[in-house]
Image (spheres, coloured by chain):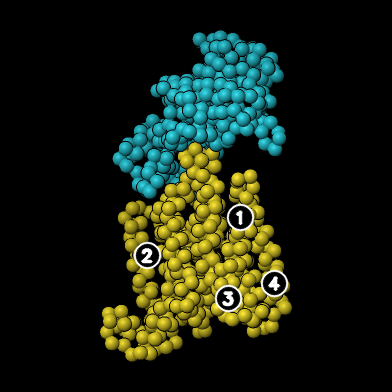
Amino acid sequence: MNASMRSLVVLSIIVSLPCLFLVSLSIGDADVGPHQVLRYFFGEQVSSIDRLVIQDIRMPRALAAVLTGAALGISGAMLQGMLRNPLASPFLLGISSGAGVCVVILFALNVAAFWIPVGAWLGAVLAAGLVFLISYQRQHISLERLILAGVAVSSVLGSIQAIFLLRSDDTRIQNSLTWLSGTLAARTWDDLSFTWIPIVICIFASLIFAKQLNLALLDDDTSQSLGLSLVQLRLMVGFIATILTACAVCISGLVGFVGLVIPHMVRLVCGTNFMYVLPMSGLMGGVVLLGADALARTYLWELPVGLVTSLIGSPFFIYLLQRRRLRQSM
Amino acid sequence: MTQLVATNLNFSVDGCSILNNVSLSVSSGEWLGIAGLNGSGKSTLLKLMAGLLVPSSGQMSMDGQAYSSVEHIHRKLSIMSQRTDVLTAMSVLDLVQLGRYPHLPAWSFSLSSNDHERVEYALEFTGLNDFRHRQVNTLSGGERQRAFLALSLAQDGSVLLFDEPTNHLDLVAQIQILSLLRRLADQGKVIVSVLHDLNQLSKYCSRMALLRDGALVAEGLMEQVFTSSNLKLAFGLDIDVVRTHDRLCAII
């Protein structure tokens, strides 16, 4: 892709974010369309019902999509760089299973809805912490140990989750499955109040590690001779990625494929430099999740957004694999 | 003038000794070649000299200062490992620019004009000007080796260490790389490399260190160390050393 084409694509992604945001505010069951949304934004008179729908129902949902997409996109890009694994996703380090098992237990115990995102956040952070604890040995964190510990912890927590699901009644199973599929339905400002500050802080903090992540693309010896501290990078990037993912999970449940596919899409446009990959992954993540949520709402009945991202993400991922195979065969 | 000195280096893992009491030195303009059997401790010694490993006892020093107290050591010392692959589709230019990272201020993300000049020099020196936009993973083994050499050059350190720089290369590519390293030594850099080919060692290096079972068999100027008796001690083979075309050759 030449430079002018690249600029055009980047510009169109930037422009599409506010456009999709407006689209997201304009669709839904209530009869509030783009006309009323634009009137609301330009400070003109709108009915109190329209204001309520735009401001308190659709806007938190759209912002939830942007924040979740940005958090998962950046987290995925950081982990793929840190783990030197293009198949890494934010859920690799046991985060999804940690959050999942906590949520299923909380649903089974029939606790108040307020505790569900809090439990998800705690479960995600504790599971990732456990994975890092297992991998840390002699002041060193090996990537192989990290990935294998992630797989092992996920497997154990996944089994516990399945046991609780099997022993729950139908309503609780349905609630759990909806959450596990990833949904942005009925998000309110309260759902964002707990998470938006850590997400914004972690997005900016991630940029500090762009140089180190560029060096991490090289082998251990070369990158260390260029001044990279591998332990520091793995701990810090792991911490930031965990907080970002935990916050995303807290808002919307387990939205799959965004963290895996978005960094690949971004690298097609921006190249490999994390100075561009990180912010663009955040931007693209927000755009894709806004678009997916709009699609999820325009279906005959509302789908969990996580199913839409998986339905779109999987074929795209297969396309990327095919493309890579073709390149390698040339 | 830079001098690298290893003093009584010992390195062990879980009580298993990898390197025993190794002392040597190498100065600007010299090229120290390290040779020995597999498992003799060559790569460990190189990593200790690069500061990537901390010795169990003993000390590495640069110009009389212990590594731990050398300021900006990553600007002065670079290592090229045996692995020359990168994770993603990185261009040669992007790769070589990474060599300037140790010189960037902590909060700076863009290269200065001085950094760009150094990158251009590195590309020019290694003959990679026309390859700058090629992806590293699409280069041949020799080209890739030169790209990583350009990365080390962009780092602009006075000490360059190489772990088997000619590994898996054809003869022409091997000679290209070794000639470039010889030019760098002639320009006053300290070069240290692990090499397996004894004749290449005797042709290009000015100093030699022979290792066996983690201990130094001999170390010093090539003329003094490259002898049948030392080579027999290091490799356990009868190796004749003859002088031809004004250089020493090993005949096995």
Helix, strand or loop for disc 1: helix
In the image, residue A277 lies at what x, y percent?
Answer: 43, 56
In the image, what residue occupies the spot 56% across and 57% down?
A88
Residue denoted by label 4: A162
Q: Mark 4 or mark 2: which comes first in sequence?
A: 2
- Colour-to-chain, yellow: A
Whether labels 1 and 2 belong to a single chain: the reply is yes
In the image, residue A247 lies at what x, y percent?
Answer: 51, 67
| Label ID, residue A13 | 2
Q: How far is mark 3 from mark 4, CA to CA?
A: 18 Å
Q: Nearer the viewer, mark 2 or mark 3?
A: 3
In the image, what residue occupies the spot 41% across and 59% down?
A204
Q: How far is mark 3 from mark 1, CA to CA?
A: 24 Å
Of residues A33 and A114, the one drawn nearer to the viewer in this rendering: A114
Whether labels 3 and 4 belong to a single chain: the reply is yes
Whether labels 2 and 3 belong to a single chain: the reply is yes
The answer to whether residue A169 is left or right of residue A79 is right
Q: How far is mark 4 from mark 2, CA to CA?
A: 39 Å
Residue denoted by label 3: A116
* Circle 1 Cα neighbour tier, 10 Å, few/some/many (<14 / 14–19 / ≥20): many
Helix, strand or loop for disc 3: helix
Which amino acid does the dot numbered 3 rest on?
Ile
Tell me, what hue is chain B?
cyan
Helix, strand or loop for disc 4: helix
Q: Quadrant of residue B182?
A: top left
